[in-house]
Structure formats: C-alpha cells, structure tokens
Amino acid sequence: MSSALPMLDYETCLDVVFDDDDAVIIEPVDAEDLARMNREMFSVGVAGIPSDYRNFLRETNGLIWDSITFYGTKRLRFEEEDFYVPDVLEASERAPTWIRGEGRLVIGRTDSAVFAHDIKAGYVVLDSTDGEVLEAYASFQDLFTAQVAAEVEAMEAVTMLKA
Amino acid sequence: MSSNDARENPGYRYEQWLNRTGRHKGVQAHTATAEERADYRTAKQGESPARSTDYALGGTDPLNRSAGIYPHDPELAAKLAQDIGPPFKTKYDQETVPGVYRKTPKSERGQVDRSWRATKRLLLPLLAEHYPEALEIMGVKKSGINQMLRGKTPSGFNTDHLHNRGGGGNNHPFNLVFMRIHEHDEKDQEVLGNSVGGLSPRRAEATHWPYTKYPIHISKERMARHDGASPSDAAYKERLEKLFEPTPERVKAWDRILENAERLGTEKNSLTVADPARVHNGQPLGDYLREDVARSVPQALLQQAAFDRATVIGERNEASNAGTKPPTTMTFRDFMHRREEIGR
C-alpha cells in the first residue's frame, strides 16, 4: 500500500502497542490451543489461522488497542464494561455473507471496518456495512503496521495542532 | 534485550507488559463453550441482503434521488416508504428514517479516510469533557472517560458515521456518533447491511437509516440499567434533551472542534447561505452548501437546513440591505437546533 505514513516497521508498531498501558494484551497463545482452534475451525468449514497471524497471536492472543481490535483463540469477557470480544472463529461465523465472502477469516475490526484474511487477496480491510474491500496487504505484518502507523500519524497531527 | 532478541522470543513483550502493568483485571479470557457457540449460531443474521430497489445512479433512478437521509421531505419519504416499508425503531432505540445509500467507490474516499482518525481524536476529548454524565449512563467507566480525554477509544465502544462513509458520508464532526460496539454493529450490519451489503459502487439502495440525534447514543436499556427503572418514551426523550443541552460552554467547544478539524485538513464546516433561485417543492433549496460539506454533513441536516433556511436567508437579506457581510457559517447552535427539529 502506498502511503505517506511514518516509517514504522512491524516490530516498532508492536512496541508502540505493548508500551501503551491502556492496551488490552492477552497471554500469548500456545501450540495446543492453536491446534484446538484449527481443528474446531476445520470442523465447521472455516479456514485455519494463517501462519503470520499465528505468529502475532504468540505475542498476544487478541488485542484491543484504541479502536483497533484483533481476535484470538479465546473469548474475552469484560465484566465491568459488560461486553465480550469474540474469538476468531465466532467473528468469522457471525460475519454476514458480504463480509465473509468465500472463506474469509475475520481477524479484527476498527470503528467502521473489518480486518480479514482472504485466500486470494491476502489481508484485507473491508467496509463493515457494505463489504467493499478498501485496502489489501500481502502479509499480516503489513496490515498491522499500516493500522498502527495511521493511528500514530493521527496522534501526532492532533498533538501538533494543540501545540 | 534488543529488538532482534524480542523477535526470536515472542513472549518477551508480554512478560515485559505483565511486569509493568499487572494482568488486566477487568478481562477474562476463556475458550468458547458449546453453549456459547450454539447461542450465536442460532441467532446469526445477515445471510442474504434483502435488496428492494438497487437503483443505478445517473439517470435511471425513477425518483431522481441522490444519496442521503430524508426525514423532512414528506413526498420523497412517502415514495421511499412504498419501496421499503414504514420506519421503525431499532433494537437499541435508534429511530430509522428513509434514506438512499449511494455506494461511494473507495477511489472517492481517500481524503475522507485520511482525516478520520485525527477527527475522532478531537471529538472524543470533547465528549469526555462536556458529556461525562451521558457517557456514564451509556456504560463508560471512569478509566474509559480518562482514555477519551486523551483522544482514545475505550474498550467496547466505537465511533460511528451517522451517514456512513461507504454510503456517501464523511468525517465531519457533526456526522460522528459515539456508541457501544454491539449497537454500532446492529446499525451497520443488521439494519443497513441487510439492504446494502455487497452493493456495487455507483449503485444506490433505498433503506431504513438508523438515526441518532445526539453525538452519543444512549439506548433505553442502558438508561434503565443506570437508573434502575425503564423510562417511559417521554421520560427517555426528556432525559436525553437535558443531557445534551447546548450550554454556552458546549457550543464554544463544538465551534472550536470545527475550527480544529478544518485546520487538520478534514472537511470544511461552513455552510454558505442558500441560493434562493433553486427551488424544490416550491421552496428555495440550497446550493447554500459548499460542495465538500454537501457530502459530509448528514443529508437530513442539510435538508432540514433547507426547509429551515428562511431565517438565514432573511438574515442575509437584512445584512445585504444593511451593507454588511451575510452570515456564512453554520455554528453548533444552528446544528443542534436543526438536529432537535429532525428528532421531533
């Protein structure tokens, strides 16, 4: 994706997220849980978790950072706030047909967009209402980096404005 | 440990984070149970969009519609209702109004999307500072309000585009509504998505458009939880009116955010005075909008402004007669006034 975003790489973006005390970070997934989830996904005809996304889940098994959410192999329940975040299987199964397409795996969301892995197109950002593919990335690292970098850019813009 | 070491030890960052913050106390991670799977599988929606109209724009639209939300054009609303049925209230208490979702191709959304994240970071602190009671009623905790003051979105919440970006809307602060995530999903996927999901670019679909009058959406359910009793319709409305009363401090804050949004390069906020030469249903209709604003502010507001423009035009004429500069900017007070009228 061509963009004028700051030159941040994947590792730096991970650091940005992990350094933020407001981020919701989850204990990294283990091999057993990944295998369980993949078995469950295959049993209902949902594509398994791609290897680069598995690597991300080994950092944090799901993430909420600002308005960006990525799903893991566990359901996350927030008792105080009275809501839950689905696991990657539920997010994919619940997605309407115009988001799910043919075998897309829904891996996350932001305010009005959905993040998914598409066997043909790689990682995609979809309009959450009408399902149009807005952005496409070759790898999860690229998708993640673009999303975090865009937020960092916005933060900097607002900080400069206030200064 | 260097970043290379971290790359080879993926659990390293988690350990560091855990040592620094302690485990997040409010969240429990668990493997989904068979019952939980069964619950959502039986409730699943959105299998096939119920397309009722699917107009091609650019000449074949029998009503000559453009994109937008039409609560105050009775003729158009009546024609739309023939296609899509009467308005209803969503599960989370959003009114619906007739509208036309014009699928905007992504090639036309570039500027709109670039400005999105920054505009939101201006809006959230304003809401936290000026509407803390409303936020508390909708379920935002103190820690969440503190996050919002720093421009961040707390877990479980989203900022919605009243007039969706994909349907022609953009990031003007007046077009944003802070909501709970599942309420946002209901609006975008279960109501709008069920008629416009998969719509091809440059086609349009008449639809029920969920509409929230205020910059924060509070469902009756949340109000009942907070107050311990379910409010009547009248009490619910009255409470909302009070919560969002446009006090002088709030008006100032909104006008400041509009200036800042403009400085950030987001859409312009000025509404120029109507050109009385353009007529619709016997009423002069605006070209009182700048082209970019026409796509940014919910069409309902613009149409209401057109119907309500007499004052503005009168002021302009008076100003013109007096040889002074006519009013050219829609302030937050104008906006709230028009939003209130739409909600009646």
Image: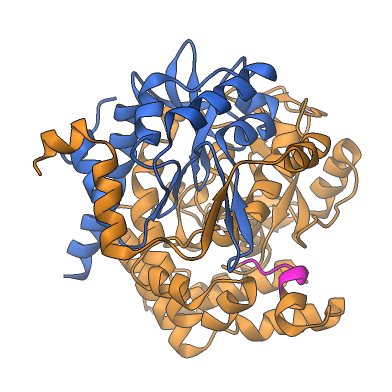
Depth order, front residue of B66/A44: A44
Instruction: Give the quadrant of residue B6.
Output: top left
Where is residue B208 drawn, in percent x and y?
77, 45
Where is residue A106 drawn, in percent x and y?
55, 30
Q: Residue at x 35, y 64 (%)?
A: B22
Where is residue A32 drawn, in percent x and y?
49, 29
Q: Is residue B87 above or below residue B261?
A: above
Where is residue A110 drawn, in percent x and y?
48, 45
**Residue B311 appears in the figure:** no
Q: Is residue B261 above or below residue B220?
A: above
On screen, residue A38 versus residue B55, left or right, reads: left
- State the residue lying farthest toward the top: A120
- State the residue lying farthest toward the left: B2
Quadrant of the image for the N terminus of chain B? Answer: top left
Q: Residue at x 87, y 79 (%)?
A: B232
Q: Quick check: is B6 in the magenta stretch? A: no
The magenta region covers: B217-222
Q: Is residue B71 above or below residue A149?
A: below
Q: Residue at x 52, y 81 (%)?
A: B132
- State the residue lying farthest toward the bottom: B248
- Chain B: drawing colour: orange
Depth order, front residue of B141/B12: B12
**Residue A112 appears in the figure:** yes
> How many numbered marks, from 0 up?
0
On screen, residue B87 versus residue B2, left or right, reads: right
Depth order, front residue of B318/B220: B220
Q: Is residue B216 above or below residue B19?
A: below
- Chain A: drawing colour: blue
Q: Residue at x 85, y 52 (%)?
A: B87
